[in-house]
Image: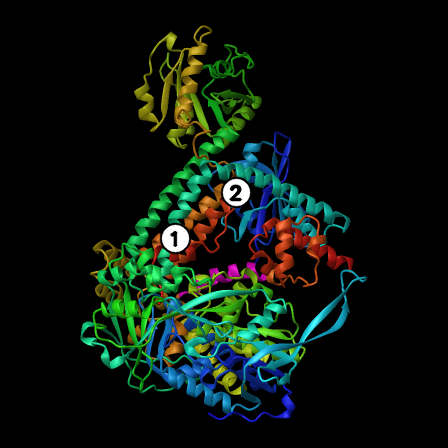
Amino acid sequence: MSETIAAISTAPGEGGIGIVRVSGESSKEIMSRVMDNFPDNVKPRNAYFGKVTDGKEIIDEAIFIYMESPSSYTGEDMLEIQAHGSNVSLKKILRAVLNCGAYGIRIAEPGEFTKIAFLNGKMDLSQAEAVIDIIKAKTDLSLEIAESQIEGRLGNSIRKMRENLLDILAKMAVNIDYPDEDIDQVVNDEFVNQIRWVLLDVDELLDTASIGRIAREGIKIAIVGKPNVGKSSLMNALLGEGRVIVTDIPGTTRDTVEESVSLGGIPIVLIDTAGIRDTDDRVEKKGIEKTEQAIASADMVMLVIDRSSDLEDEDNRIIKFVEKMNGEKILVVLNKSDLGESIDEDTIKKKISGVTVVTTALTEKKSLEAALKVSEAVGKMFGIGNINPSESNIVTNERQIQMLKNASMNLSDAITMLQNGESIEIAELSVHYAYDSLGKIIGEEAGEEILNTVFSKFCLGK
Amino acid sequence: MEENIERNNNEYEIIVIGAGHAGCEAGLIASRMGKKTAMFCTDIESVAMMPCNPSIGGTGKGHLVREIDALGGEMGVNTDKTLIQSKMLNTSKGPAVHSLRVQSDKRCYHEEMLKTVKNQDNLDVIVSEVVDLLIEESNVEKDIENEEKTISRKKVIGIKTADGRKFHSKEVIICTGTFLGGKIFIGDEVTLSGPAGMKPANEFGENLKKMGFDVRRFKTGTPARMLSDTIDYSKMKEQKGDENIVPFSFLNEDKNFDIEQISCWLSYTNETTHKIILENIEKSAMYSGNIVGVGARYCPSIEDKVSRFKDRKRHQLFVEPEGRDTKWSYIQGMSSSLPLDIQHQFYASIPGLEHAEIIRPAYAIEYDCIDPTTLKPSLESKLFEGLFCAGQFNGSSGYEEAAAQGLIAGINAVRKLNKETPLILGRDQAYIGVLIDDLVTKGTNEPYRMMTSRSEYRLLLRQDNADRRLTELGYKYGSVNNDRYDRYQKKKKRVDKEIERLKRVKIDLKLLKRFLIKYECENKSNEISKEIIARRRSDIEEMNNQVLADILARPSIKYVDLAEIDNNMPSLSINEQAVVEVMIKYSGYIKKQKTEVEKLHNLERKKLNEKIDYNSIRGLRIEARQKLTKIKPLTIGQASRISGVSPADINVLLVYLEKNRREK
C-alpha cells in the first residue's frame, strides 16, 4: 500500500467553510475513523452529514464526501471533510485525521495534491509548468520558514537530541558490526537508560506543542452558568465594552455569542452561552443545545456562580454537566461577592476536583478588577504566564508535531523491545526511525553520520 | 606453473584484466555463461592471492560471500574447501546479524582457485602484463534530445600487453586491484611494487589517465608476518573455532566438515608499545607526508590507533596462522608503516611476541583507482562502451567486496554481449546492491568496506536467506546453473512447508505453560527482576490457542527448543532451521521493513534516460543539475540518493518525466 496524505486545503483565516482534504488508499478507512456516525455503505461522491471526532470528543459538524479512484481531483481515493471555516477547528480535524491510526497517513508536502493530480493524468500538459512553479515556490517558502526555525532554539534542541541518538546508534552499530573488537559491549539496560533521556526531551518538546498551539490558535472559552449570574457582564468586562445585552431578566442570551479578545498577547475566543435550566421555551431550548455544543468544542469552561445565595438545583445541574470535563480546564467564577458570601471557594473545590476558583463582583466600578483577576487565572491554567514565546522552544507546526510524535513512539518501542530482551539490531530500527523523524524537522536526513561517529569514537580495525 | 595454450588468434569475447578475487569471479562466471574468456595476470601466483589477512567473511562481508554463492559465484565454494577455522559471529544477538567468518589457508585458497580456473571450459589464463586498452571510435548516433547533435561513442575492442601483443574482445573487465601504480612504504623506504612484492602495473595506470580516467590514490596497510614457532602462545589467549562448522556455500549445506581447526591467539599492546610508537611517529611513512593516498578509517595503522586514542591503555591484536602447513602468522590489528627497526622494537614489547621473528615487515601500499561515480550501476564505464570495472580498482577494499563486483561485472559483460538487460541488484535485495549503488551513486573518498550498518534493510538482507533472495534471480539472469537451482527449489519447499506447519499446529496448554516457565522464567532468573518474572507467569496463564509459530515468536525461544513440545519436527539443515526461525520470529519487523521497501520501489520503478539534458530542465537547482549530469542516475530512486539533489528537485524530475511521457 502507498502512503496517504492530508492537509487543510482552504486558505487560512476565518471563512464560512473550510476543507480538510485526504488523498490515498486509506481515505475510506480514515472516514470510518473520524466520522462519528459513519454509515454502513458509503457511496462515492455522495455527501454525508456527520460529526468529526478524534475518538475522545466531537470536534465539529461537517459534510463528508468520499471519492473513489480514479474519479477524484488527484486520481486516487480521496476524502473531503467540509467543516466550518474556523482555523482552530480545521486544525483539530486535520490532527484527528493524522492521529486516527490509519495506514501510512502523513501530512502533505507543499503542492503535493497538485503533483499527484498531474502525475495521474488529471491535468493537461500546459499545467505541468505551473505544477513545477507551485512545487518550487512552496518549497522555497517552507524552506524559508523551516530555515528560520532551524537557526533558532528549536533547531538547536532537536540537534542536541539527534546527537544523543547518534551516539546510541553508533554504539549499536559498533556492537553489531564489530563483535570481535575490544570495545565495551553495551548491554540492553544501558541503551534503555540512554534512550529514556532522549525520550524525555522529545516528550518535553511535544508538551510545548499545546502551548505553541495556544499561541497560534488561541484558547476557546465557553462561559456557562444559570441565567442572570453575570455571564454577559463577565464577557463584557473581559472585552472591555458592552457588546452583549445585559438585563436583569433571566434568559436574555438565547443564542451563543462569540467574541475574540487578546489577553496578554494570547488570542482568546469567548463564547457566551445561554443559561442552562429546565425550560419549555422552544427558542431557549435551542439555545441550551447550542451551549452543550459550545462546551464540547471549547478548550476550557468558565462556570459563573452567584455566591450571594446558596447553590440551587440549576447550579448543581450545570456542575453535573461540566464535571465530566477535566477539572483543570474549569474556572469557577464566584460572582456577586458584593451582595453576600453564602458559598465559599472550598465548597466548590470539593464539588469539582481540580478546579480553579476566583471571586469577583462584576459591578460597573469593579469590572476591570474582575477582568484582570479572571484573565490572570486563565493565564495560570494554561501556563502562559511563564512563557515568553520568543525565547522558548515552541513547536507550532503540525508537521513538526507529527514528526515528534513519531520519534516519541519509536523511542518508546525501542525501550519496550530492549526490556523484553529483544536483541539490539531490532531495537536499532526503531531508534533509527526516531532519528530520521527528528531529522525531518530540521531538514537533515541520515547519511554517513552514523559511520562517521563510529569511526571517530571507537578504535576499530586491523 | 604451466599456462593454458592461447587459441583462436588472440580473439576472445571477454577479456578480464587481473586474476584476484574480482578477476576470478568475473572470468569464471563469463566462461560458465558460455563466453570465450581470457583472464590476464602479471604473475600466476597472483591468482586469488590473499595479500592481507588470512580470513574471509565477517559482519557484512560474510553476507557478501553468501550472496556471491547464491548467484553462482565461486568464493563461497573455494572458502569451504580451504578453511582452517570457522566461526559464526554475533550469535549473542539476533539471527539477522549473525555473520560467518573463516580463517583460510592462503596457499590452498590460491591453489584451489587456480585449479578451478584452469579446468574451466572457455577460460584461458594468460600470464602477461596488460599495458593499454584498444579503443575504437564508432557508432556515431543521433542524440535523442537534439537531432542536430551527434554523439560519438568510444568502444573498447581489446587490450595490448607489455610484449606488444594485441588481444581482441567484445568486452573488457578491469580488475587490477592494488597493482596499478603500486608503491610500498616501510618508514622512509619506498618501493615501486604490487602487493606482496609482486611487479606493479605502472604503464597501464599512466595510459588510463591519458584516456581520461579520473585516477586517484588510495592507501591501505598490512601488518607484519611472523614465524609461528617463535611466538610464545602461553602468554596469549586461545581463540578457537566453533564446534559445528557452518559452510559458506549453499551447495555444501549437507556436507560434514570433519576437519581439525587451528586456533588464533589474542594478545594486547601495552604502554611500552605505545611509547615506542609515539616516540618514533615521525618516522612513519603516514606521518612523514610521503603517502598521498587516502586510507580507510576502519583500517587504521597501529600508529593511528595509538595517536588518535591516547586514553586507551591497550589495543588488542590477534595472531592468525596463514595456513595449515605454513609457518607464517599474520598479526591482525598491527598494520604499520614504521621503519623495520622500530617495528622490531614495538612488536617485541607485546606479550608472546618478545622473541618472535618478523618474516615480512608491515607496510603501507598506495595504488591507483578510479572515481566509481564514472560507472553505471551495471559496472560498465560511462566513458567507454564495453569496458567494465570491478574490485579495488573501483575504490573498494576487501576480498569479498572485490569478488562481489567481479561477479556482477562478469554477468553484465555477458548480458551486454547477449544484448540483454544488466543485472542491477536493489538495496533491498542484496548487500551487493548496497555496495554497488553506494559506489556508483555516492562515490567514496576512502577504500569502501561493507558493514551491515550501510544497509537500510538489515533484517531483510540476512546471510541465512541469501539464496531465497538471489538464486531465483541468478537463474533468470543465467548465472545460476540447473543443479544449484534444483537444490534451491527443494530447499525452499522444505522451509515453506515447515513455516506453514508451525503456523497451524496448536499446543496443549499445560505442556506449553511448563515449557514457557522453564525457558522464560527459570532460565533467566538471574538476568531479569522478580516482578518481570511474575508478570510473565501471569501472562502465560492467560495464553490460549497458541500455535507453534506464536511460541517461536517469543524472544527467548529458539527453533530447536521447540523439539520439547513438538513431536513432528522435520529434520532440517542448520541453515534451513535458521531461515524458519528468523522468518517467524521477525515477521512483524520484516513486514515493517517491507513497507519501507515499497516506498523505495515506487521511486526505482521510475526510469531516467541516461541522455536527459538536466541543464534544460526548468526548476532544478544548479547543484542538482551538475550532480545529475555527472552521475546520470538510471532511476528516480538512484537520483534521490545523490547528495545535493533535494526532494524538491525530485518532484521537478517526476513532473518532467510525466510531461515527457505525454508529449510522446
Residue A9 location, quadrant: top right
Q: Left or right of B330: which side holds B16?
A: right
Cα separation between marks 2 and 1: 21 Å
Q: Left or right of A231: which side holds B543?
A: left
Residue located beneath label 2 in the image? A399
Q: Left or right of B649: which side holds B575?
A: left
Q: Could you tell me if residue A85 is visible in this image? A: yes
CB contact under 8 Å: marks 2 and 1: no
Q: Tag 1's secondary structure?
A: helix
Residue located beneath label 1 in the image? A413
Question: Residue B176: x and y, percent?
Answer: 52, 75
Q: Tag 2's secondary structure?
A: helix
* Residue furthest right as drawn: B148
Q: Amino acid at mark 2?
A: Arg
Q: Could you tell me if residue B588 is visible in this image? A: no
Q: Nearer the viewer, residue B325 or A340?
A: B325
**Label 2 Cα neighbours within 10 Å, binned few <14 / some 14-19 / many ≥20:** some
Q: Quadrant of the C terminus of chain B?
A: bottom right
Q: Which residues are magenta?
A: B586-602
User: Which label was assigned to residue B276?
Assistant: none
Q: Is residue A258 above or below residue B106?
A: above
Specify which label sits upstream in the sequence, 2 or 1: 2
Residue B285 belongs to the span the image colors magenta: no
Q: The disc numbered 1 marks a residue on which chain?
A: A
Q: Left or right of B414: which side holds B509?
A: left
